[in-house]
Amino acid sequence: MKDRSILKGLDRRQVLAGLGAAATLPLMPRTALAADVKQITVTSYGGIWERAIRECFVTDFKARTGVDAEVLIGGPPQWISQIEANKDNPPIHVLVATPDSAAVAVKAGLVDPISVEKVPNLANVPQQFIDMALGHGAAFDYGAAGLAYNKDTVKNPPKSIKEFVERTIAGEWKAGLPTISYAPAPQAFVWSFADALGGGVENLDPFFAAMQKMRPNVVFWTGVTDFLNLMDAGEVDIGVYYDGRTWAHYDTGKTYIDFINPEEGGVMSPVCTMKVKNAPEIAWEYVNSMLAPGPQAEFAKILNYGVTNTQVQYDELRQKRITPWEKTRFPPNDRIGELLPAWTERWNKEIGA
Amino acid sequence: MEGWSYYWENRGSRLLLTAYVVAFFIFLIAPILIVVVVSFSATSYVAFPPREGLSLQWFQRFWEYKPFLNSLIVSIQIALLSAALGALLGVPAALALVRSRRRLANTVMTFLLSPLSMPLIVLGFALLFFLSRIGFGVSFLSLLIAHTVVSLPYIVRTVAGVYRGISPEFEETAAILGANRWQVFVNVTLPMIKPGIFAGALFAMLISLDNLPISYFFGSAETNTLPVVMLSYLEHQFDPSVAAASTIQLLVAIVGLVILERTYGLQRIGMPT
């Protein structure tokens, strides 16, 4: 009789729906069930990046707060979609993103504004690195896109992008250049070369004119590891590439490779950290760990990339390898994002690679 | 002379066909073999043929890099569960639609097969928003539902194909002899459609194991699948451990097929008994 009174007023469908919902409870995301914060979810790229994130930032965060941080491996488009679909109860609490993805997250209202009150280590981060996250985060590490070359085949490397272009046209070497479908190419290559050759974000004519002439001596690549394969195979001698990745390749035993920060300045290619809106407040502490000098110095040691806290003291090797941020150029990411469809169309028409 | 001419013509055609088949298999199998060979490379970068001898270090790396191992376990769980759930939902649907005389049946069948005709990346994106809106969020359950949506058409299609070839008279005879609906299903229909279920479930599992576009949107720290982790790994590190991961994934698929062969027999799959 008691059972009947419990089910009174419910029809068979409602009971079945209730049982179904109950059965799914163990499979529901933990954040939906637990109000107290014992763990947050943070993001990382895969491979050595993930190891560095765990060893440097998660360890520091856990030691300071006692809260664990789970690391979700993937990429910004995937994470931003997941946050967008679950704005009220985001499955991700701290987002790492390139400036273009960071801008998307800010414009979609997915991340919180950052301040020194919330993140004390922000006080030692140059304003440029905060501006590139539109005040909703800060870059915590960066690479510089310059020129990587083979010391065995290029005995007298170029000092500037302009010289690189002239000598590529002259056929002194085979150059490896990214196609526009490689995500960072618009900044690291197209804008960079246009800027170095007297054009700019609004004028790509010098870039396309140079490309037409360089074309016979160029091998195009589409993925970041393709360039290294081309170098290893001896198909290219020099090309646009990043400092940290060049040194990572050097450390695998490929001591033929070297990096040049061109006179015009390598292109600043940072990664920003941002607290997701509606994430627990403790997530700010993780952002603070990512901007802390100690963990950042360790991060730089593992990845050979520059970090943004001015208090960081690099070891001797990293001092030699890492391009100082003052000697880089900051691309106009916002404007490039707006112009990218037109750039891509022009690339397809004139270059077609 | 005519006989000789026929002989040479016939022999020439056979040689051409053999050459075509050999070339076909080389193109099909060579890339897989290269991946397997590279996974045993002693070099720290991807090179073929391996330049510094052979080694098992990349399998050790696979073992030590927890995201690889954890995601492989999730991939296997999702593949098995989505195939099972797909069968649970797809078999009754296929049976009902094949025997239905209503005009709507064809429309419903087309609808059930529609995930096959949609770009999976669009389907994944749509499912992410739909499942999040109804409260499932980014979770193991969502990942399972999404994979089931993709596996369902394979099961419905194969079961429907097999069931369509079976005469209704078998079931009618059993019913006339006194069997109730459940008995007809268990003792008559199920044994006859089993090859279709196995074939569909097998396709579903293989598709699920390899699925990237759907899994991409549902990966959490606990539910990332191997293809998603491999993609992210590849973007930032290019050593042969990704080849080792692919070899292991291949091994999982082969072990599955061997088990199926031993327990059921692959040659029976897809053929009505």
Image (tube, helix red, strand yellow):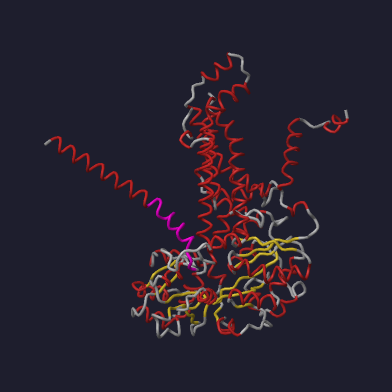
Please report the residue visible at 63 percent of the width from the left and 23 percent of the height from the top: B182
Query: Residue drawn 44% across and 73% down?
Result: A204
Rendering coords of residue A5 (x, y %): 86, 31
* Percent coordinates x, y for residue A84 in the rendering: 65, 56
Q: Which residues are magenta?
A: B27-43
Coordinates of residue B216 in the picture (x, y in percent): 58, 54
**Residue A141 among those drawn in magenta:** no
Q: Position of residue B123 (x, y in %)?
A: 56, 48
Q: Main secondary structure of the magenta part?
A: helix
Q: Indicate left or right for B215 with B266 as reference.
A: right
Residue at screen point 77% across, 65% down: A282
Q: Is residue A199 visible?
A: no
Q: Decide if residue A43 is in sight here.
A: yes
Q: Is residue B105 above or below residue B42?
A: above
Q: Quadrant of the N terminus of chain B?
A: top left
| Residue at the image position 47 percent from the left and 73 percent from the top | A189
Classify residue A351 by image quadrant: bottom left
